[in-house]
Amino acid sequence: MRMLGRLGAHLHWLLACLVLALAAAGAHAQVTAVRVWPGPDSTRVTFEAPREVPWRLFLVRDPDRVVLELDGVDIGPALAKLGSTVGADDPLIRQARVGRFKPNVVRVVFDVKAEVAPQAFALRPIGEFGHRIVLDLFPANARDPVATFLERQRVAGSPEAAAAGAGSPPSPAPAAPAAPAAAPGSTAALPGAAGVPPAAAGAGTAAPGTDAATTPPRAAAGGPPGAFVSQGPDPSARNTRLPPGTRPLVIAIDPGHGGEDPGAIGPTGLREKDVVLAIGRRLARLIDAQPGMRAHLVRDGDYFVPLQMRVVKARALKADLFVSIHADAWMQPTARGSSVYALSLSGATSAAARWLASRENEADLIGGVNLNVSDPILKQTLLDLSQTATINDSLRLGRSVLSELGRINRLHRKQVEQAGFAVLKAPDIPSILVETAFISNPDEEQRLADETQQERIAQSILDGIRRYVAQTPGITRPR
């Protein structure tokens, strides 16, 4: 009897464990974060959870609404505050509502301002991010994103836009929202929306070959004397018309990361994506103040641009030079200093360069790229990578910029390193990646956050560009 009693107690314990396990398996998941990233002409919304969440996406007409159904989730704090996360200036979303549609289904409804073509896909966990569902909203009649980008730059560079922006103070670094996340996993696009590229967002500043500069309106900062003068007379202002047959030296500035992808995060929470955008904007103002030079920001806001699309936009602008701006990070907080990198097609020049390129190339996985969408624009980007001459020019540009950075900061690498950076693969544009300092170093993080140091970094990059240009006559493209 004692044996039977023990066996019964044991079976009772096993049954209780089984019941608890089944209950846990059937428990609702918690959406831990919801983030909204409005871009110039599209909006991205990401939902993050500790485990994979089944979902469905569909449209409802009259009035137009986008509906995302989530299975097996609770309406926790993150979902409950989604409505307040959508800004009044969002280009596409009027408002967002969340409610329980069925006992096991939560419905997220987006009232939109115009007809849209939504896409959704999932991203698997990467880095600090869990499972994510990414919802991209594009205008239903969206043009080719590169054509839209160029048109936006042409309009922004008009004399009227420049006059409206004259005298405005420098744009501060964007305020840091809650720690970002990205989207992973299986992909699914709404039928009929597959032709809309996932990265309609992007900013820059000018239609190639136009007489007027095409950067967004911003006050021109004073530049150093002796500025480089390209072919033709000196335009005294960035919107001065140049004589027929001449064009300014076009420089594409690429602040790294953005949107879902924060880049590296410093000890006190400074995010790479914010500080490099601030430096990029400063560099653009300095360049625009130079006679015969024009700057174009590939990213001019807190939204994500895929790596290859950054290259596409630079080539669409017919850029003469491409400068990608970043802030380095390492596991040990003692690492410090500035570095400059160029592309390598035959292996990295050091293990550290290989590691850095691998980390930077993960931006698409973190920021979220819908791999199920066929995009012919991206397929045509990397034409002929037998670009020895372009890489040699990149190395010379990199050495000039590195030398100038050495005047204001310690150098982490005293020579230009090379590795397979995806963002540097324009076959016909000398391209460099500048690691301004180590955001993981407490002292350098503090300096990166300082506006005076940001200006010094921007000025050093400009001085390096000017030195390279002075040594390389005739580098501007014909009109």
Image (cartoon, rainbow, N blue to C red):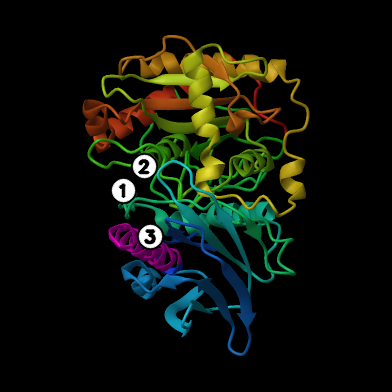
- Above or below, comparing residue 378 to residue 108 in the picture: above
Looking at marks 3 and 1 on the same chain, the residue that comes earlier in the sequence is marked by 3
Q: Is residue 99 left or right of residue 452?
A: right
Identify the residue position indicated by label 1 in the image.
Answer: 172
Q: Which residue is mark 3?
A: 14
Q: For numbered disc 2, what is the local secondary structure?
A: helix
Q: Is residue 148 magenta?
A: no
Residue position for label 2 = 278
Residue 114 shows in this picture? yes
Q: Report x, y in % for residue 426.
A: 67, 31
Question: Could you tell which of marks 1 and 2 lies nearer the N-terminus?
Answer: 1
| Residue 296 seen by the camera | no
**Secondary structure under the numbered disc 3 in the rendered image:** helix
* Amino acid at pointer 2: Ala
Real-space CA distance between mark 2 and mark 3, rounded to the nearest whole angstrom: 60 Å
Mark 3 and mark 1 residues within 8 Å of each other at the beta carbon: no
Give how far apart the Cα atoms at labels 1 and 2 are.
6 Å
